[in-house]
Amino acid sequence: MLTKKVKSRISFLVISIVLLITSVFFILNSLKENVLYFLTPTEAKFKEDLEIGKNIRIGGMVKKGSIYADSKEIKFTITDFKNEILVSFSGTVPNLFAEEKGVVAEGKLKDKNFFVADRILAKHDENYMPPGEKNFLDNNAK
Amino acid sequence: MIINFISMNGYGSFVWLSFGIVLISCLVLYLKTKKTLRKYEKEFIAEFETLSESNKKAVLEKSRIANQILATNSRAD
Amino acid sequence: MIKFLLPSNIYFFLGKIIKFINSIFFLILIIGLAFALVLSPPDYIQGDSVRIMYVHVPSAWIGLASFSLISLFSILNFVFKTKNLYLINKSIAPIGLLFTSLAVVTGSLWGQPTWGTWWAWDARLTSMIILIFFYVLFILSYKLIKKEDLAVKVSSFLAIIGSINLIIIKYSVEWWSTLHQPASLKLGNSSSIHSSMMLPLMIMLLVLLLYGALIFLMKYKTEIIKMKKKNVKRL
């Protein structure tokens, strides 16, 4: 049914697409470090070439009950439920910053467990619902 | 009530700005597309008018689209 | 079926469909805006800024869907050499560019009150910017290249390369850590959007789809007239 010309075009196309996908895959793989927007506390802990004092981003959940704020600074713990990092920040946090919500902190590590942030971003999750419908979340989790 | 609706608990400027941008840019693209369509319809008719009577007849017999374009444009005018 | 797809046959339906969309469009637009801005509840964390989602998400979907269609048609055009597909692609591209840009702009307007920043160079946001570049290059390729054969080749090449970026956009939020949240709607999974917010989202999607269809049909009509004009000269 297909003519010879059409068949040769299809095979040319398939071969070039396969080559293209493989090359993009390798490029992305080598760029992996740069593509990550933030490191989780676990990644930060086990990353060997992590320079203390270099600007990085740490992301995870704000640990429940870990927020301490006074007039000068706000302190809280970022956790990924395996490891955690204590963060200190002076400045205003976004409205959505809260306990047990996602957060990304930009700044420098002082040591493996203490992070000084210049900027706090709130990371929103994918759930959308009206107030007072928490059980929607629980149903959804199942 | 109305002030509440406009301010949206402080998010008003962001919400209204995004809906405004969407509506306005959609309207602009619509008008631009419509203008281009009209322009080409007019050009097509101008081209058609330059033909001799016998050629006009030939085009109309051969092409249903030519018929359509001429018909829609005379209605619009 | 093939006969039905000939431009001369399609042309007759274009006018009718355009009229039909025009007649129902404003009614649906007003219903959509009423649900999106008034009737739907605010979100439990984001408050009223969730309403931006009702234009942001449909715009992003249409931007991605348009490029998927362009890529698919470019592949088919490459294999079967049907000129009609090229005309269709030229008619889809402006809609895709508009909606991808709108998705980025409205997303930025949502990000400022929610994340606390207008912009972040994470994988999702960056790959959307790359999609805009692909649209611009695609449109420039047929605007600037006068030789049609060459324009078809260059634009198809761009569309096929660009389809890989589509895959990256789709999975960026799952493969890498990004500031952007993962997809709320997944095939085969229950959605994490409450039904009272799903309704306005779907109506706004319908509104923007109808708008996109309208622009597409008008552009396509223009392309057919352009083609016919050349044929008249030749007679």
Image (tube, helix red, strand yellow):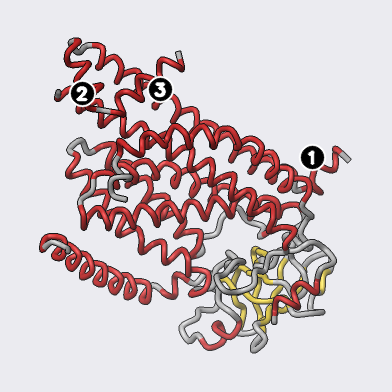
Determine the chain carrying the residue at label 2.
Answer: C
Provide the residue designation for mark 3.
B38
- Residue ranking furthest to the right: B1
Q: Is residue A11 left or right of residue A63?
A: left
Query: In x, y percent, where is residue C35?
Result: 73, 47
Which residue occupies 40% across, 44% down? C92
* Helix, strand or loop at mark 2: helix
Label 1: which residue?
B6
Amino acid type indicated by mark 3: Arg
Looking at the rendered image, the disc whose residue lies closer to the viewer, 3 or 1, is 3
Label 1 residue SS = helix
Disc 3 and disc 2: Cα gap in Å? 18 Å
Horizontally, is C42 left or right of A17 in the view?
Answer: right
Distance from the alpha carbon under mark 2 to that under mark 1: 56 Å
Q: Residues within 10 Å of mark 3 (few under 14, many from 20)?
A: some
Tell me the residue that label 2 is attached to: C232
The three-letter amino acid code for the residue at tag 2 is: Val
Q: CA distance from mark 3 to mark 1?
A: 39 Å
Observer-nearest of C57 and B59? B59
From this view, report whether residue B35 is shown above or below residue C155: above
Q: In percent of the image, x 25 and y 53: which residue is there?
A: C77
Would you say A97 lies left or right of A18 here?
Answer: right
Residue sitting at x 26%, y 37%: C144
